[in-house]
Image (cartoon, rainbow, N blue to C red):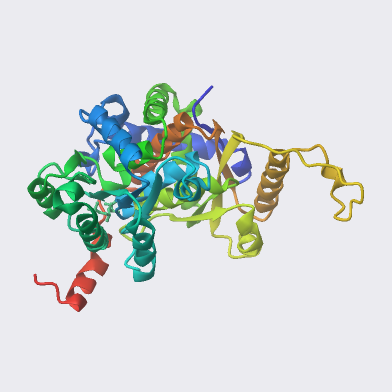
């Protein structure tokens, strides 16, 4: 069974097989460019075969995670963008939705709390309140080592740790994930003696989840990182070998390109599992930063269903016909419940008695896709059998690789992000940063 299945039957009335075959050569050319490292941004292709190359520090990383799980009630992960979203996506997909609450209540495990992903003093104050009377460690993640949000945030946690444990004790609880040789964070880590993990030079932030950027927090959350990497490895093998007609990754890239060229300007990634909310956030960054340039690119948006059907459903069904939907389906839920029968049946729900919640969820997904297709919203479907570490590793690699192929088909360099600098320039000027 494929690790990730792709089904475009919900887009049949929008993309003909003829259109797909016309895209075959173009898609295959993009794949060749990627594999032969001859496309734009080819110095940032370290992620491409990353699952095949075990990180030299992987055992040390696992030992660090074990130490943190033993000596810390909380791990604060400080980072933003590509140094944040991947770890959160994996953790939220694979852990109990209330894992942090349970850990903080002393029911076991280390709570993994993210900070440095905004400049909100309200949020930061709350995290500081949570950790001040608890044993905690910090994993500060920044490839450049100079990003304002995590750098400012880290100052607060460093100060608190030093107050609680002394400078040396604090240094034993700070883990820096950064560049191998450059940047302010690397300099500080070396000077203070923090344990460091390296973000490879040739892996950009949004492609870095399977490096220590994602793996350390994910391991602290108790997730099987071996299985995560094995899933990505499996996906790599599949997309290298499978021909276009059965290659899920190539077909997804081709289908979204076909819809973009028909004038669809928004791709909506939807899920029916709240744990996938941050996978969508990660995907939004991956596709938004990779494709949105030179006046081109699909706008990546996301919805959590059925929740957002009660807020965004009207627009999707009936508003401007500018979008298509890509649904992420989990075929078998990790847990399920059977709906009971009620003698009074006031709510009229006895017709569902004996049915599982998952059955109802799946019918909601089918009914929604049918309604949206009828309303002019093509539906692509990406499925995994279960939401386990292997499948999530596969999904990550599937989306990363399809993103690179799509980017080449769009004619952009999918691995740079020149637009991200504009707001920083203005902010630094307003803040009076010495240049
Ligand atoms: O994908 C990217 O390059 C960005 O989103 C970065 O990850 C983000 O700006 C954080 O950068 P850094 O890791 O250098 O702090």
| Percent coordinates x, y for residue 125 in the rendering | 35, 66
Q: Residue at x 52, y 42 (%)?
A: 96
The quarter of the rendered structure image containing the N terminus is: top right
The quarter of the rendered structure image containing the C terminus is: bottom left
Q: Is the residue 2 above or below the residue 311 in the image?
A: above
| Percent coordinates x, y for residue 152 in the rendering | 23, 63
| Percent coordinates x, y for residue 394 in the rendering | 44, 32
Quadrant for residue 67, please give it: top left
Q: Nearer the viewer, residue 169 or 349?
A: 169
Q: Is residue 23 visible?
A: yes
Total of numbered circles in the picture? Answer: 0
Q: Is residue 97 left or right of residue 128?
A: right
| Percent coordinates x, y for residue 418 in the rendering | 24, 58
Q: Nearer the viewer, residue 251 or 235?
A: 235
Q: Residue at x 18, y 41 (%)?
A: 196
Q: Nearer the viewer, residue 129 or 209?
A: 129
Q: Nearer the viewer, residue 343 or 74?
A: 74
Q: Residue at x 26, y 26 (%)?
A: 54
């Amino acid at each position: 069974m494929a690790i990730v299945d792709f089904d475009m039957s919900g887009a049949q009335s929008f993309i003909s097989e003829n259109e797909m075959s016309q895209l075959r050569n173009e898609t295959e050319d993009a794949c060749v460019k990627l594999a032969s490292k001859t496309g734009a941004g080819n110095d940032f292709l370290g992620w491409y075969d990353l699952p095949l190359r075990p990180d030299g520090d992987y055992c040390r990383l696992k030992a660090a995670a074990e130490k943190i799980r033993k000596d810390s009630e909380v791990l604060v992960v400080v980072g933003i963008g590509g140094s944040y979203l991947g770890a959160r996506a994996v953790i939220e997909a694979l852990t109990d939705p209330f894992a942090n609450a349970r850990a903080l209540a002393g029911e076991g495990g280390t709570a993994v709390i993210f900070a440095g992903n905004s400049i909100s003093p309200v949020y930061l104050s709350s995290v500081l309140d949570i950790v001040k009377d608890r044993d905690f460690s910090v994993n500060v993640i920044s490839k450049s080592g100079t990003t304002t949000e995590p750098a400012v945030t880290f100052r607060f946690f460093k100060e608190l740790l030093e107050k609680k444990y002394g400078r040396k004790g604090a240094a034993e609880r700070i883990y820096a994930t950064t560049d191998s040789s450059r940047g302010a964070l690397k300099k500080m880590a070396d000077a203070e003696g923090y344990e460091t993990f390296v973000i490879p030079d040739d892996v950009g932030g949004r492609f870095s989840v399977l490096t220590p950027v994602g793996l350390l927090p994910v391991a602290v959350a108790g997730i099987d990182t071996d299985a995560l990497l094995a899933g990505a490895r499996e996906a790599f093998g599949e997309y290298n070998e499978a021909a276009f007609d059965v290659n899920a990754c190539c077909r997804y890239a081709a289908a979204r390109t076909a819809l973009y060229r028909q004038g669809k300007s928004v791709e909506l990634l939807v899920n029916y599992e709240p744990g996938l909310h941050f996978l969508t956030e990660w995907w939004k960054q991956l596709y938004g930063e990779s494709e949105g340039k030179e006046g081109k690119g699909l706008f990546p948006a996301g919805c959590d269903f059925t929740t957002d059907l009660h807020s965004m459903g009207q627009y999707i069904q009936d508003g401007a016909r500018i979008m298509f939907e890509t649904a992420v389906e989990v075929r078998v839920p990790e847990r399920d419940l059977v709906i009971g029968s009620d003698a009074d049946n006031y709510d009229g729900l006895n017709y569902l008695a004996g049915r599982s919640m998952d059955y109802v969820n799946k019918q909601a997904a089918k009914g929604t896709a049918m309604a949206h297709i009828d309303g002019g919203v093509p539906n692509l479907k990406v499925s995994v059998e279960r939401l386990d570490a292997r499948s999530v590793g596969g999904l990550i690699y599937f989306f990363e690789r399809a993103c690179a192929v799509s980017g080449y088909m769009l004619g952009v360099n999918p691995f740079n992000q020149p637009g991200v600098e504009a707001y920083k320039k203005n902010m630094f000027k307003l803040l009076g940063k010495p240049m």
